[in-house]
Amino acid sequence: MVVTGITANSNLVPTIVLLGSFAVPMAFVVWAYEHGTSGEITVPYLFRAFVVGGVLGLLGASLLETYLLHPSPWMYVGVGLIEEAAKLAALMYVAHRLHVRTTRDGLVLGATVGFGFAAFESAGYAANALFTVHGLSIRAMVETEILRGLLSPVGHGLWTAIVGGVLFSASRRRQRLHISGAVILTWLGVSLLHALWDSMHGIAIAVTLRLTGDAWQAGMIDRGYLPEATPEQGHLIALLDWAGLIAISAIGLTWLRTLSLRASSDDSEDEPSNENGRPAIHPYPTPGVISQAPRDPDTGRTPEPFSDT
């Protein structure tokens, strides 16, 4: 941003948009991956899920919202249902060839698709903030990216991780991904969180005006106009807005924590156990390294390699 401001070089604007939109989501995908997945979830697979899942989810949601949504008090409910359904469909597309489906893999892969959706969506919001009636505004674009970057871990990535964990848990012992009743209820639950998140500013305004509004403000609301808030009301609106976002984030994080604890127990049940009752460890071989041949259980020796001579 500093270099762009000093040099006034508009060619650097795409770099700011990409770095600002993708840095935080990709960092959280790496963090989720390092906390454990099965051998099928590799770095190239996560990259494909991030890009393909994010793009497909965003395009699908944009098309559906264009043709199905109209201005109404319930519009954000429709936004939540459509976008969460689009991300769920994108997740199922990128995961349909997996043979091993653990709950933890669902959490990680769902978060990856959700963060991909958030990154591409943030890039669009940043581009819109760049263009103003007074020309290009680097400051508005950067402010948009900073705010969305800070909030992205408790937004799309969190909601899709929750759905992904429940989806993979319902499909653990099935050959195909299974949409169970729990998956549908989870989709409805995260859609509600999404709708509340998007509409929280409007809810804060409505609550503030109902509690502290004057007669002339109530009259304007009844006629369909939004009255200007006083400075004191503006502070209360901001307080209620952020309090609501924090409450929604806490609910989502608690939900995710519950699924993560259940994932540890569910995934340990699926692992084979040794004679001591402990989970047997079967590490995946490192690419390019020849793993040691297994020992004969009777003699304890490593069998000699087969030779034609």
Image (spheres, rainbow, N blue to C red):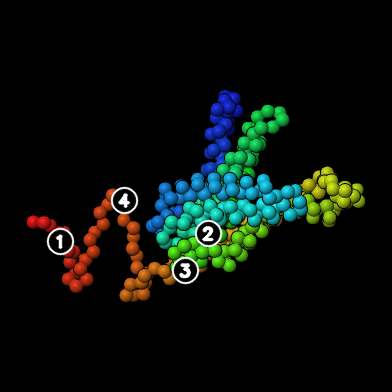
What is the three-letter code of the residue carrying label 2? Gly
Q: Which mark is residue 304?
A: 1
Instruction: Residue at 69% x, 55% y: name it.
Output: 77
Q: Are marks 3 and 1 in contact (CB under 8 Å)?
A: no
Residue 298 vs 77, above or below: the answer is below
Q: Which mark is residue 266?
A: 3
Mark 1 or mark 3, which is nearer the start of the sequence? 3
Instruction: Residue at 83% x, 56% y: name it.
Output: 211
What is the three-letter code of the residue carrying label 1? Glu
Q: Which residue is mark 4?
A: 287
Residue 219 vs 254, above or below: the answer is above
Front-lying residue, 148 or 115:
115
Q: Is residue 157 visible?
A: no
Q: What's the distance in space between the residues labelled 3 and 4, CA to CA?
A: 28 Å
What is the three-letter code of the residue carrying label 4? Pro
In the rendered image, the residue lying farthest to the left is 309
Mark 4 or mark 1, which is nearer the start of the sequence? 4
Mark 4 or mark 3, which is nearer the start of the sequence? 3
Residue 98 picture location, percent across and down: 43, 58
> What is the crowding at mark 1: few (fewer than 14 residues within 10 Å), some, or many (at least 20)?
few
Instruction: Residue at 84% x, 55% y: name it.
Output: 210
Judge left or right: residue 206 versus residue 304: right
